[in-house]
Amino acid sequence: MANIRSVQDFKEFLKDNRELLHKKAVRIEDLPPDDDWILDDEWDEIYEQEVLKRGKV
């Protein structure tokens, strides 16, 4: 991975790797209900803080 030193560098990285990121992404609906990631309450706290209070992730 190239050195990312600015927001613009990060945007370029996302643009250049969009297909790979989509290929590697996992839909939450595809995870088993007992998956550790789903059961971790920390994600609910992050969602509440970022989305409900600030309107974005």
Image (tube, rainbow, N blue to C red):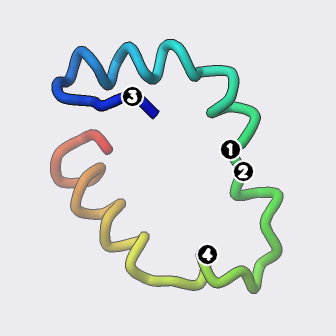
Count residues near mark 3 (Cα–Cα under 10 Å), then give few for <14, some for 14-19, many for 20+: few
**Label 2 sits on what residue type?**
Val
Residue drawn at 77 percent across, 57 percent down = 29
The answer to whether the residue labelled 2 contacts the one labelled 1, judged by CB atoms less than 8 Å apart, is: yes
x and y, in percent, of residue 24 in the image: 71, 42
Q: Is residue 18 above or below residue 38?
A: above
Q: Which mark is residue 25?
A: 1
Q: Which mark is residue 2?
A: 3
> Which residue is labeled 2 in the image?
26
Percent x, y of residue 19: 68, 21
Q: Is residue 40 left or right of residue 32?
A: left
User: Element under label 1?
Assistant: loop
The quadrant in which residue 17 appears is top right
User: Relative to 43, does residue 18 appear above or below in the rendering?
Assistant: above
The answer for how far apart the CA atoms under marks 3 and 1 are is: 20 Å
- Mark 4 vs mark 1, foreground winner is 1
Decide if residue 27 is on the left or right side of residue 17. Answer: right
Rendering coords of residue 21 (x, y %): 62, 33
Count residues near mark 4 (Cα–Cα under 10 Å), then give few for <14, some for 14-19, many for 20+: some
* Residue at the spot of label 4: 38
Between 4 and 56, the one lying in front of the other is: 4
